[in-house]
Image: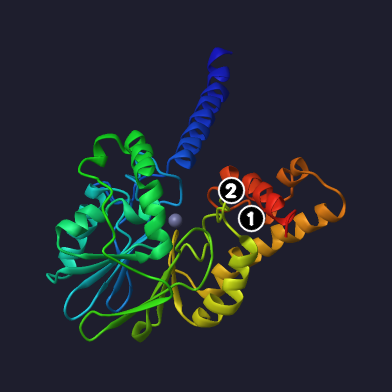
Amino acid sequence: MISILKQPLRAGVALIMTLTVSVMVQASPADKYPQSMLYSAPVKVADNVWSAIGATQYYTYENGGHNNNLSFVVGGDGVLVVNGGSAYLLAKALHDEIKKITDKPVLFVVDENGQSHAALGNGYWKEQGAMIIAHEDAVAEIEQHGLSGLEELTGILKEQIEGTEVVAVDRSFADKMSLDLGGLSVELIHFGPAHSAGDISVVVPERNVMIAGDMAFHQRMLPVFPDTDTAAWLETWRDGFGPYSQNMIIVPGHGEVTDFATVDKYTRGYLEYVRGKVAELLDNDGTLEDAYQIDQRPYAHLETFEQLAGKNAGRIFEAMEFE
Ligand SMILES: [Zn+2]
């Protein structure tokens, strides 16, 4: 009798253990590159262009602050890095990978905006002699919020934050800047307002590559911040970014390398979807509470959906009340 009972019990325990393991994996995905502070090793996007794809989650100790894409372009004279990274040691980890590919110096580091994972590692690169470049609005963002960002990340990354300081950006621009890496040119473009202050994209025309930055999302749900103007983001998409990048290889700010149709679906498509639902609510005297409840199931498979979906709809509601 007892031995017959044992089997289903064991199966039950095994099932519970499997469930626990899969829940843990979802909460904190395994680091794809444990021997490095990077979450994953750089992959070749095209000739001369590489990207280390970050975790699509929030900052954690385990992902080492590598939760955005850190890309680089190798020219005849030297290297351009897109994003300083979240921390000094993370920047160094990326540099260790660059050195495996080329012995040329890192000439330029371009921050895709003023967020911590774009800018806090800049100090490492400055020490290597690189010129730090960002949009003028990103410069203001770093000056205003750099220190609080560093404080927040210190709590998360602990000893991995060692050496990290907020440093001044060396050069800024408003609309466009061209750089020559030696036989290979790179364009830095501010297409217009998008998800945060000073968002820029880095284009390698000869390789048909668009390193879009936080202009374009797909695997991760896009965030709407208190100061994100989603109407302006859509306009920037329609008039600038979209027509420009239609046939290009897209390296988004987060998640794997993809194509225009995919980021169009999850950036323009998502913004239009939520704005459409909010407009319906406003027409029917809906409230902010109703906005939090908007059905966003078509996007439920995206990473960070749980943290962002309700918040995004609430912020869009608050903004559209005054549009
Ligand atoms: Zn980002």
The answer to whether residue 67 is seen in the rendering is no
Specify few, some or many for label 1: CA neighbours under 10 Å numbering under 14, 14-19, or 20 or more: some
Give the amino acid at mark 2.
Phe
Is the Cβ of the residue at disc 2 closer than 8 Å to that at disc 1? yes
Distance (Cα) linking label 2 and label 1: 7 Å
Q: Determine which residue is flagged by label 1.
A: 299
| Quadrant in which residue 60 is drawn | top left
Q: Which residue is located at x 73 percent, y 55 percent? A: 322
Foreground: 64 or 172?
172
Query: Is residue 33 toward the left or the right of residue 215 in the image?
Result: left
Q: Which residue is located at x 49 percent, y 73 percent? A: 191
Q: Determine which residue is flagged by label 2.
A: 305
Return the residue found at the far right.
284
Query: Residue 319: x percent and y percent?
Result: 68, 54
Secondary structure of the residue carrying tag 1 is: helix
Query: Residue 111: x percent and y percent?
Result: 35, 62
Q: Which residue is located at x 45 percent, y 45 percent? A: 58
Give the amino acid at mark 1.
Tyr
Query: Residue 246: x percent and y percent?
Result: 53, 81
Query: Residue 56: x percent and y percent?
Result: 45, 52
